[in-house]
Each structure stands twice: as C-alpha cells, then as structure tokens.
Amino acid sequence: MSYFLAVVLALAQAPAVVSDPSLNTLIDGIDRTFGRMRDFSSDFVQIYYDPIKPKRQESGHLYLMRPRMARWEYKNPEEKLFVSDGKTVYFYTPADRQVAMEAVKESLDDRIPLMFLLGRANLRNEFARIEMLREKPFLAGTQVIRLFPRRETGIDDIVIEVDPGNYHVRRLVFSTDDGARSEFIFSNIRTNTGLRSSTFDFKVPAGVEVIEGITQ
C-alpha cells in the first residue's frame, strides 16, 4: 500500500523553511516544471522491496496527463496495463483475464502519486522538511533531496533525484514504516507533447473477470 498519495493530498498551511540556497533553487525549478506540465511520458523501471517478500522489478512505458490521467504499459516481465481516466483506475492482467478497478480518490496504489504532481507548484507547502543529500546519486548528474511528510501517514521519507538541467524527476523512492520501499526510475522523458485524453480510455475486454479494489 502506498501512503504517498495521502501526503500529496493532505496539505498543511505553514510552508517548510529551507535555508540552503542551492536547495531553494532546486525546489523552485521543480515547482516551475511541474506547475507548467500538462502531460508527461517516459520509459520506467519499477522496483518494490518488502521485508518478507522477494524484490520485484518491472518495466514499461508511462503516460501522464492532467487531470489525474495515467497509463502504465508494463512490458517486462509480463504484459499488464494500469490506466486512470481521471475518475476510475483499472489494472488489467491479460494472463489472468482479470481487471481490478477502484475510484481514483480511494486508491492508495504506488503508481498514483506522479499524476497528482502534474500542475502542482508548491513543494514547501506539501512537506514538513526538505533537505539536500550530499551522497552520490544513483543516477549520474542528478541532485538528491529528501522530503518528510507533515502528518502521520505511515511513510518515513521520500527521496527524489532531479536533473538540475531541466528539473525533471528521474528517480523517486519512498519508504514506509513497515520496512517496505518502492522505487521508480524514469528515462527518455518527454513533456507537453499534446497527449490526447483518448490515450487514457479503457474498456473492459469481453469475458474478463472484474473485481473491486487494487492490491499490490
């Protein structure tokens, strides 16, 4: 279960105070980039770590569009499709001939958060503390920041790696208090290409079982 969506939606009044000039520059750049972003597409790698389960890694292509639309096309290790049309989320697994669905506003799925960031432009209001990390980044050339949620949501912290040249988020990692960790790596990023809303349409295939609720 992802608690990051709750962090994004549960905004508090007082902004985080950031005294590091280089960090302020980075935050301002991220805010401008996401505030102006209408759509986003990229290749992705998704890795999920759980203390009691084997590491799981998947990859594919991602499309995002305001408001609240997403299309995750999984290619490896198996084909799957995760789609949000802005109101309803569908997760289709062809091999199982099954579609899971739930309302966007009720979903705490790990794939939800990025689509809520499109069009947002105030990280300082959304997190209690933001700090620059001086450790070597996972992706060369990126800068790393850690964000701490304002409320008790079950998440310990969120780490993002940002390209300082265009302020795109290249890597996102968030850890929960149960020891689980979800990681997303993005490449071949394109923004504001004029995606159409029809990209996010989904029709349940004939003969496929439909169930309520999406689980990890």
Image (spheres, grey):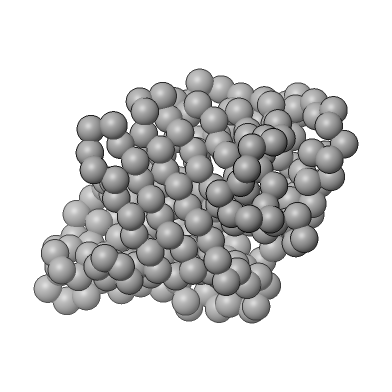
- State left or right for residue 132 relative to residue 186: right
The x, y position of residue 11, in whole percent, is 64, 32
Whether residue 106 is visible to the viewer of this picture, yes or no, is no
Quadrant housing residue 10: top right
- State left or right for residue 194 relative to residue 183: right
The x, y position of residue 98, in whole percent, is 17, 63
Q: Residue furthest right?
A: 21
The x, y position of residue 137, in whole percent, is 61, 46
Q: Which sits in the foreground, 25 or 97?
A: 25
- State left or right for residue 168 relative to residue 64: right
The structure residue drawn at horizontal position 24% and vertical position 67%, both measured from the top left corner, is 78
The structure residue drawn at horizontal position 75% and vertical position 55%, both measured from the top left corner, is 164
Q: Residue furthest top?
A: 152
Quadrant housing residue 141: bottom right
Whether residue 39 is visible to the viewer of this picture, yes or no, is yes
The x, y position of residue 174, in whole percent, is 49, 38
- The relative height of residue 97 versus residue 155 in the rendered view (above or below) is below
The structure residue drawn at horizontal position 54% and vertical position 56%, both measured from the top left corner, is 115
- The relative height of residue 124 versus residue 140 in the rendered view (above or below) is above
Q: Tell me how many marks there are.
A: 0
- The relative height of residue 51 versus residue 197 in the rendered view (above or below) is above
Q: Which sits in the foreground, 204 or 82?
A: 82
- The relative height of residue 2 versus residue 201 in the rendered view (above or below) is above
The structure residue drawn at horizontal position 25% and vertical position 56%, both measured from the top left corner, is 100
Q: Which quadrant does the N terminus fall into?
A: top left
- State left or right for residue 39 relative to residue 180: right
